[in-house]
Image: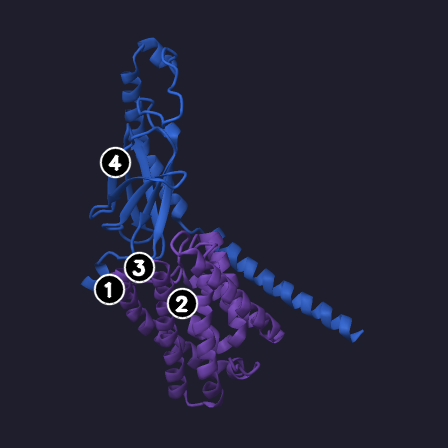
Chain colours: A purple, B blue
Amino acid sequence: MAHIPDGVLSAPVLIAGGVASAVLLGIAVRRLDYDRVPQAAVLAAVFFVASLVHIPIGPTSVHPLLGGLMGLVLGWAAVPAIAVALLLQAVFFGFGGLTVLGVNVFNMAVPALLMAALFRPALRRETRPRVVFALGAAAGGVTVVLTAALVCAALAASGSEYVPALGIVLLSYGPLAVVEAVVTGAAVTLLLRVKPELLAVGGVVDA
Amino acid sequence: MLVFAASPAHAHKLKVFAAPVGAQIEGSAYFVGGGPARGARVVVETTGGQPLVTLQADEEGRFAYSATMRADQVIVVDAGDGHSARFTIAAGDLPESVAPPPGMPAPAAGVPASPVAAAQAGVPLEDLVGQAVARQVRPLREQLNAYEDQVRLRDIMGGIGYILGIAGLTMWFRSRRREGAGG
Protein backbone atom coordinates (compact mmCIF):
# COMPACT_ATOMS: atom_id res chain seq x y z
CA MET A 1 0.00 0.00 0.00
CA ALA A 2 2.96 2.30 0.22
CA HIS A 3 2.95 1.80 -3.54
CA ILE A 4 0.33 4.13 -4.93
CA PRO A 5 -0.30 3.23 -8.59
CA ASP A 6 -0.64 5.57 -11.57
CA GLY A 7 -3.91 7.31 -12.19
CA VAL A 8 -5.08 7.61 -8.59
CA LEU A 9 -3.62 10.87 -7.35
CA SER A 10 -4.43 14.30 -8.72
CA ALA A 11 -1.86 16.34 -10.62
CA PRO A 12 -1.15 18.92 -7.86
CA VAL A 13 -0.40 16.12 -5.37
CA LEU A 14 1.87 14.38 -7.90
CA ILE A 15 3.76 17.59 -8.65
CA ALA A 16 4.10 18.53 -4.98
CA GLY A 17 5.36 15.05 -4.14
CA GLY A 18 7.81 15.08 -7.03
CA VAL A 19 9.23 18.47 -6.13
CA ALA A 20 9.48 17.61 -2.42
CA SER A 21 11.25 14.33 -3.16
CA ALA A 22 13.63 16.00 -5.61
CA VAL A 23 14.57 18.55 -2.93
CA LEU A 24 15.09 15.81 -0.33
CA LEU A 25 17.15 13.81 -2.79
CA GLY A 26 19.27 16.86 -3.61
CA ILE A 27 20.01 17.52 0.06
CA ALA A 28 20.71 13.84 0.69
CA VAL A 29 23.14 13.52 -2.22
CA ARG A 30 24.97 16.69 -1.18
CA ARG A 31 25.35 15.38 2.38
CA LEU A 32 26.15 11.87 1.27
CA ASP A 33 28.92 10.27 3.25
CA TYR A 34 30.51 8.03 0.65
CA ASP A 35 31.56 5.48 3.23
CA ARG A 36 27.82 4.84 3.63
CA VAL A 37 27.25 3.91 0.00
CA PRO A 38 27.83 0.15 0.38
CA GLN A 39 25.48 0.00 3.38
CA ALA A 40 22.90 2.08 1.56
CA ALA A 41 23.14 -0.32 -1.40
CA VAL A 42 22.70 -3.40 0.78
CA LEU A 43 19.70 -1.91 2.59
CA ALA A 44 18.22 -0.71 -0.68
CA ALA A 45 18.50 -4.27 -2.01
CA VAL A 46 16.83 -5.66 1.12
CA PHE A 47 14.08 -3.05 0.90
CA PHE A 48 13.63 -3.82 -2.81
CA VAL A 49 13.09 -7.53 -2.13
CA ALA A 50 11.10 -7.07 1.09
CA SER A 51 8.13 -5.80 -0.90
CA LEU A 52 7.70 -9.35 -2.23
CA VAL A 53 7.27 -10.85 1.22
CA HIS A 54 3.55 -11.00 1.83
CA ILE A 55 2.60 -11.33 5.45
CA PRO A 56 -1.06 -12.26 5.86
CA ILE A 57 -2.44 -10.37 8.83
CA GLY A 58 -6.12 -10.54 9.65
CA PRO A 59 -8.20 -9.75 6.59
CA THR A 60 -5.33 -8.17 4.70
CA SER A 61 -1.85 -8.95 3.51
CA VAL A 62 1.01 -6.55 4.01
CA HIS A 63 4.68 -6.44 3.25
CA PRO A 64 7.53 -5.02 5.35
CA LEU A 65 8.43 -1.40 4.69
CA LEU A 66 11.73 -1.22 6.60
CA GLY A 67 11.73 2.59 6.48
CA GLY A 68 12.59 2.85 10.18
CA LEU A 69 15.60 0.58 9.89
CA MET A 70 16.88 2.46 6.86
CA GLY A 71 16.54 5.77 8.66
CA LEU A 72 18.32 4.52 11.78
CA VAL A 73 21.24 2.96 9.92
CA LEU A 74 21.60 5.33 6.99
CA GLY A 75 20.36 8.75 8.06
CA TRP A 76 20.17 10.98 4.99
CA ALA A 77 21.57 8.21 2.79
CA ALA A 78 18.20 6.48 3.26
CA VAL A 79 16.64 8.92 0.75
CA PRO A 80 18.62 7.84 -2.34
CA ALA A 81 18.39 4.21 -1.20
CA ILE A 82 14.57 4.43 -0.98
CA ALA A 83 14.33 6.35 -4.25
CA VAL A 84 16.41 3.82 -6.17
CA ALA A 85 14.62 0.81 -4.67
CA LEU A 86 11.15 2.27 -5.33
CA LEU A 87 12.09 3.13 -8.92
CA LEU A 88 13.29 -0.43 -9.51
CA GLN A 89 10.17 -1.89 -7.86
CA ALA A 90 8.03 0.19 -10.20
CA VAL A 91 10.02 -0.89 -13.26
CA PHE A 92 10.55 -4.57 -12.45
CA PHE A 93 7.52 -5.51 -10.36
CA GLY A 94 4.96 -2.91 -11.40
CA PHE A 95 4.49 -1.89 -7.76
CA GLY A 96 3.56 1.76 -7.71
CA GLY A 97 3.43 4.01 -10.74
CA LEU A 98 6.30 5.92 -12.26
CA THR A 99 4.44 9.23 -12.18
CA VAL A 100 3.68 8.63 -8.50
CA LEU A 101 7.31 7.89 -7.70
CA GLY A 102 7.85 11.31 -6.12
CA VAL A 103 4.90 10.92 -3.76
CA ASN A 104 5.86 7.34 -2.87
CA VAL A 105 9.47 8.32 -2.15
CA PHE A 106 8.27 11.22 -0.03
CA ASN A 107 5.90 8.97 1.95
CA MET A 108 8.73 6.59 2.77
CA ALA A 109 11.66 8.97 3.14
CA VAL A 110 10.18 11.60 5.44
CA PRO A 111 9.31 9.13 8.24
CA ALA A 112 12.75 7.52 7.83
CA LEU A 113 14.47 10.90 8.19
CA LEU A 114 12.31 11.84 11.18
CA MET A 115 13.20 8.56 12.90
CA ALA A 116 16.87 9.19 12.19
CA ALA A 117 16.67 12.64 13.76
CA LEU A 118 14.66 11.41 16.76
CA PHE A 119 16.35 8.13 17.65
CA ARG A 120 19.86 8.15 16.25
CA PRO A 121 21.46 10.36 18.91
CA ALA A 122 20.06 8.20 21.71
CA LEU A 123 20.90 5.01 19.87
CA ARG A 124 24.50 6.11 19.45
CA ARG A 125 25.02 6.49 23.19
CA GLU A 126 23.02 3.46 24.25
CA THR A 127 24.61 0.07 24.90
CA ARG A 128 21.93 -1.80 26.87
CA PRO A 129 20.35 -4.34 24.47
CA ARG A 130 16.85 -3.91 25.87
CA VAL A 131 16.86 -0.16 25.51
CA VAL A 132 18.30 -0.46 22.02
CA PHE A 133 15.55 -2.93 21.11
CA ALA A 134 12.93 -0.53 22.46
CA LEU A 135 14.37 2.39 20.51
CA GLY A 136 14.50 0.36 17.31
CA ALA A 137 10.98 -0.96 17.85
CA ALA A 138 9.65 2.54 18.43
CA ALA A 139 11.32 3.79 15.25
CA GLY A 140 10.03 0.85 13.20
CA GLY A 141 6.45 1.11 14.45
CA VAL A 142 6.18 4.89 14.22
CA THR A 143 7.57 4.85 10.67
CA VAL A 144 4.78 2.56 9.50
CA VAL A 145 2.11 4.72 11.11
CA LEU A 146 3.62 7.89 9.65
CA THR A 147 3.88 6.36 6.17
CA ALA A 148 0.25 5.20 6.42
CA ALA A 149 -0.80 8.69 7.47
CA LEU A 150 1.08 10.24 4.53
CA VAL A 151 -0.50 7.76 2.08
CA CYS A 152 -3.93 8.65 3.44
CA ALA A 153 -3.14 12.35 3.24
CA ALA A 154 -2.08 12.00 -0.40
CA LEU A 155 -5.31 10.11 -1.21
CA ALA A 156 -7.51 12.53 0.70
CA ALA A 157 -5.87 15.50 -1.01
CA SER A 158 -6.56 13.93 -4.40
CA GLY A 159 -10.25 13.27 -4.06
CA SER A 160 -12.94 13.02 -1.44
CA GLU A 161 -14.12 9.66 -2.81
CA TYR A 162 -11.21 7.96 -1.04
CA VAL A 163 -12.03 9.30 2.41
CA PRO A 164 -14.45 6.49 3.44
CA ALA A 165 -11.82 3.81 2.79
CA LEU A 166 -9.03 5.58 4.66
CA GLY A 167 -10.04 4.19 8.03
CA ILE A 168 -9.65 0.66 6.68
CA VAL A 169 -6.28 1.52 5.17
CA LEU A 170 -5.05 2.91 8.48
CA LEU A 171 -6.39 -0.10 10.39
CA SER A 172 -4.60 -2.54 8.11
CA TYR A 173 -1.35 -0.81 8.95
CA GLY A 174 -1.79 -1.44 12.68
CA PRO A 175 -0.62 -5.08 12.66
CA LEU A 176 2.19 -4.19 10.25
CA ALA A 177 3.39 -1.52 12.67
CA VAL A 178 3.69 -4.22 15.36
CA VAL A 179 5.55 -6.63 13.03
CA GLU A 180 7.81 -3.87 11.78
CA ALA A 181 8.54 -2.73 15.34
CA VAL A 182 9.69 -6.22 16.32
CA VAL A 183 11.75 -6.66 13.14
CA THR A 184 13.43 -3.25 13.45
CA GLY A 185 14.09 -3.73 17.17
CA ALA A 186 15.66 -7.13 16.56
CA ALA A 187 17.73 -5.84 13.64
CA VAL A 188 19.09 -2.91 15.60
CA THR A 189 19.91 -5.11 18.61
CA LEU A 190 21.75 -7.51 16.33
CA LEU A 191 23.68 -4.66 14.73
CA LEU A 192 24.67 -3.38 18.16
CA ARG A 193 26.02 -6.80 19.08
CA VAL A 194 27.91 -7.70 15.92
CA LYS A 195 28.62 -4.38 14.21
CA PRO A 196 28.12 -1.45 16.58
CA GLU A 197 30.05 0.93 14.33
CA LEU A 198 27.24 0.68 11.77
CA LEU A 199 25.02 2.61 14.14
CA ALA A 200 27.74 4.82 15.56
CA VAL A 201 29.58 6.22 12.53
CA GLY A 202 28.33 8.67 9.98
CA GLY A 203 27.37 12.30 10.02
CA VAL A 204 25.02 13.57 12.70
CA VAL A 205 21.53 13.92 11.38
CA ASP A 206 20.08 17.26 12.33
CA ALA A 207 17.09 17.17 10.07
CA MET B 1 -5.44 -19.61 12.47
CA LEU B 2 -8.83 -18.88 11.00
CA VAL B 3 -7.84 -15.26 10.75
CA PHE B 4 -4.83 -16.16 8.63
CA ALA B 5 -6.93 -18.33 6.32
CA ALA B 6 -9.15 -15.38 5.38
CA SER B 7 -8.45 -14.06 1.91
CA PRO B 8 -6.54 -10.79 1.87
CA ALA B 9 -8.68 -7.71 1.42
CA HIS B 10 -5.93 -5.90 -0.37
CA ALA B 11 -2.40 -6.64 -1.34
CA HIS B 12 -0.55 -3.99 -3.22
CA LYS B 13 -1.45 -4.35 -6.83
CA LEU B 14 -4.87 -4.40 -8.40
CA LYS B 15 -5.31 -6.08 -11.74
CA VAL B 16 -8.23 -6.29 -14.12
CA PHE B 17 -8.77 -8.77 -16.89
CA ALA B 18 -11.56 -8.85 -19.45
CA ALA B 19 -12.31 -10.53 -22.72
CA PRO B 20 -15.27 -10.41 -25.07
CA VAL B 21 -17.49 -13.42 -25.62
CA GLY B 22 -19.52 -12.27 -28.57
CA ALA B 23 -20.68 -8.75 -27.86
CA GLN B 24 -20.71 -9.47 -24.14
CA ILE B 25 -17.55 -8.45 -22.32
CA GLU B 26 -16.80 -10.40 -19.17
CA GLY B 27 -14.04 -9.54 -16.79
CA SER B 28 -12.76 -9.74 -13.28
CA ALA B 29 -10.75 -7.52 -10.95
CA TYR B 30 -8.40 -9.00 -8.38
CA PHE B 31 -5.40 -8.23 -6.25
CA VAL B 32 -2.15 -9.84 -7.27
CA GLY B 33 -1.31 -12.41 -4.62
CA GLY B 34 -4.62 -11.67 -2.94
CA GLY B 35 -8.34 -12.09 -3.35
CA PRO B 36 -10.95 -10.59 -5.66
CA ALA B 37 -11.69 -6.87 -5.64
CA ARG B 38 -15.15 -7.10 -4.09
CA GLY B 39 -17.58 -4.37 -5.09
CA ALA B 40 -14.96 -2.35 -6.92
CA ARG B 41 -16.21 0.44 -9.16
CA VAL B 42 -15.78 -0.37 -12.85
CA VAL B 43 -15.93 2.36 -15.45
CA VAL B 44 -15.75 1.59 -19.16
CA GLU B 45 -14.34 4.48 -21.14
CA THR B 46 -13.46 5.28 -24.70
CA THR B 47 -9.75 5.67 -25.38
CA GLY B 48 -10.45 9.41 -25.21
CA GLY B 49 -11.58 9.07 -21.60
CA GLN B 50 -15.30 9.46 -22.23
CA PRO B 51 -17.26 7.16 -19.87
CA LEU B 52 -19.51 4.60 -21.59
CA VAL B 53 -20.78 2.33 -18.80
CA THR B 54 -20.43 2.32 -15.03
CA LEU B 55 -20.64 -1.03 -13.24
CA GLN B 56 -19.91 -2.55 -9.91
CA ALA B 57 -17.95 -5.79 -9.47
CA ASP B 58 -19.75 -8.55 -7.58
CA GLU B 59 -18.55 -10.51 -4.55
CA GLU B 60 -16.04 -12.37 -6.69
CA GLY B 61 -14.76 -9.26 -8.39
CA ARG B 62 -16.54 -10.21 -11.63
CA PHE B 63 -18.41 -7.91 -13.96
CA ALA B 64 -19.98 -8.07 -17.40
CA TYR B 65 -21.46 -5.66 -19.92
CA SER B 66 -22.52 -5.55 -23.53
CA ALA B 67 -20.34 -3.61 -25.91
CA THR B 68 -22.41 -0.88 -27.51
CA MET B 69 -19.93 0.04 -30.18
CA ARG B 70 -17.07 -1.56 -31.99
CA ALA B 71 -14.22 0.61 -30.78
CA ASP B 72 -11.25 0.31 -28.45
CA GLN B 73 -12.50 0.62 -24.89
CA VAL B 74 -10.66 0.98 -21.62
CA ILE B 75 -11.93 -0.71 -18.46
CA VAL B 76 -10.90 1.25 -15.38
CA VAL B 77 -11.34 -0.41 -11.99
CA ASP B 78 -11.10 1.55 -8.78
CA ALA B 79 -11.08 -0.31 -5.46
CA GLY B 80 -11.75 2.94 -3.60
CA ASP B 81 -8.71 2.73 -1.34
CA GLY B 82 -6.07 4.04 -3.69
CA HIS B 83 -5.84 0.96 -5.89
CA SER B 84 -6.81 1.25 -9.52
CA ALA B 85 -6.09 -0.66 -12.69
CA ARG B 86 -6.99 -0.50 -16.37
CA PHE B 87 -7.40 -2.96 -19.21
CA THR B 88 -7.97 -2.23 -22.88
CA ILE B 89 -10.32 -4.21 -25.11
CA ALA B 90 -9.30 -3.86 -28.75
CA ALA B 91 -12.01 -3.13 -31.29
CA GLY B 92 -10.75 -6.05 -33.38
CA ASP B 93 -11.73 -8.49 -30.62
CA LEU B 94 -15.39 -7.52 -30.88
CA PRO B 95 -17.65 -9.21 -33.42
CA GLU B 96 -18.55 -7.31 -36.56
CA SER B 97 -22.21 -7.35 -35.62
CA VAL B 98 -21.52 -4.63 -33.05
CA ALA B 99 -22.15 -1.20 -34.52
CA PRO B 100 -19.09 0.89 -35.31
CA PRO B 101 -18.70 4.17 -33.42
CA PRO B 102 -20.58 7.15 -34.89
CA GLY B 103 -18.63 8.89 -37.58
CA MET B 104 -16.94 5.69 -38.73
CA PRO B 105 -18.18 4.03 -41.90
CA ALA B 106 -19.87 0.68 -41.43
CA PRO B 107 -18.03 -2.24 -43.02
CA ALA B 108 -19.06 -2.38 -46.62
CA ALA B 109 -22.01 -4.73 -46.99
CA GLY B 110 -21.67 -7.57 -49.42
CA VAL B 111 -17.94 -7.97 -48.86
CA PRO B 112 -17.69 -10.77 -46.34
CA ALA B 113 -14.59 -10.57 -44.13
CA SER B 114 -13.62 -14.21 -44.27
CA PRO B 115 -13.89 -17.27 -46.52
CA VAL B 116 -16.18 -18.97 -44.03
CA ALA B 117 -18.54 -16.06 -44.17
CA ALA B 118 -18.29 -16.02 -47.90
CA ALA B 119 -19.12 -19.70 -48.11
CA GLN B 120 -22.09 -19.41 -45.82
CA ALA B 121 -23.09 -15.97 -47.10
CA GLY B 122 -24.35 -15.23 -43.60
CA VAL B 123 -22.78 -13.33 -40.76
CA PRO B 124 -24.45 -15.09 -37.80
CA LEU B 125 -22.42 -18.27 -38.28
CA GLU B 126 -19.20 -16.33 -38.17
CA ASP B 127 -20.32 -14.66 -34.96
CA LEU B 128 -21.14 -18.05 -33.51
CA VAL B 129 -17.71 -19.41 -34.39
CA GLY B 130 -16.11 -16.27 -32.99
CA GLN B 131 -18.00 -16.73 -29.74
CA ALA B 132 -17.03 -20.38 -29.47
CA VAL B 133 -13.40 -19.59 -30.11
CA ALA B 134 -13.47 -16.75 -27.60
CA ARG B 135 -14.88 -19.12 -24.99
CA GLN B 136 -12.15 -21.66 -25.71
CA VAL B 137 -9.34 -19.14 -25.73
CA ARG B 138 -10.44 -17.32 -22.61
CA PRO B 139 -8.78 -19.64 -20.05
CA LEU B 140 -5.55 -19.35 -22.02
CA ARG B 141 -5.77 -15.57 -21.98
CA GLU B 142 -6.44 -15.60 -18.25
CA GLN B 143 -3.48 -17.87 -17.68
CA LEU B 144 -1.24 -15.69 -19.78
CA ASN B 145 -2.40 -12.65 -17.86
CA ALA B 146 -1.70 -14.36 -14.52
CA TYR B 147 1.70 -15.44 -15.80
CA GLU B 148 2.51 -11.81 -16.46
CA ASP B 149 1.77 -10.94 -12.84
CA GLN B 150 4.34 -13.26 -11.43
CA VAL B 151 7.49 -11.65 -10.20
CA ARG B 152 10.23 -13.85 -11.48
CA LEU B 153 13.70 -14.48 -10.20
CA ARG B 154 15.28 -12.57 -13.07
CA ASP B 155 13.34 -9.45 -12.03
CA ILE B 156 14.66 -9.73 -8.50
CA MET B 157 18.23 -10.43 -9.55
CA GLY B 158 18.05 -7.65 -12.12
CA GLY B 159 16.93 -5.15 -9.51
CA ILE B 160 19.64 -6.13 -7.06
CA GLY B 161 22.17 -5.93 -9.87
CA TYR B 162 21.05 -2.38 -10.66
CA ILE B 163 21.37 -1.36 -7.02
CA LEU B 164 24.89 -2.74 -6.76
CA GLY B 165 25.77 -1.14 -10.08
CA ILE B 166 24.56 2.27 -8.97
CA ALA B 167 26.52 1.93 -5.73
CA GLY B 168 29.61 0.94 -7.69
CA LEU B 169 29.23 3.91 -10.03
CA THR B 170 28.85 6.26 -7.08
CA MET B 171 32.04 4.93 -5.49
CA TRP B 172 33.92 5.11 -8.77
CA PHE B 173 32.76 8.68 -9.35
CA ARG B 174 33.91 9.63 -5.91
CA SER B 175 37.31 7.98 -6.18
CA ARG B 176 37.89 9.74 -9.50
CA ARG B 177 37.00 13.10 -8.00
CA ARG B 178 39.27 12.47 -5.07
CA GLU B 179 42.18 11.56 -7.31
CA GLY B 180 41.56 14.73 -9.29
CA ALA B 181 41.65 16.82 -6.12
CA GLY B 182 44.70 15.02 -4.78
CA GLY B 183 46.88 15.14 -7.85
Marks 1/3: CA distance? 27 Å
Q: Are marks 1 and 3 on the same chain?
A: yes
Marks 2/3: CA distance? 26 Å
Marks 2/1: CA distance? 18 Å
Hey, what amino acid is under mark 2? Leu
Residue A57 in view in this figure: no
- Chain ID for label 4? B
Residue B140 is drawn in which quadrant?
Answer: top left
Which residue is at 64% across, 63% downward?
B169
Mark 2 and 4 residues: CB-CB less than 8 Å, in contact? no
**x, y percentage for residue A5?**
40, 54
Q: Quadrant of the C terminus of chain B?
A: bottom right
Provide the residue designation for mark 2. Answer: A65
Label 1, secondary structure: give it.
loop
Marks 3/4: CA distance? 28 Å
Whether A90 is drawn above or below A171: the answer is: above
**x, y percentage for residue A71?**
47, 75
Provide the residue designation for mark 1. Answer: A58
Hey, what amino acid is under mark 3? Ser
Circle 2 or circle 4, nearest the eye? 4
Provide the residue designation for mark 4. Answer: B65
Name the residue nearer the viewer: B22 or A51.
Answer: B22
Hey, what amino acid is under mark 4? Tyr
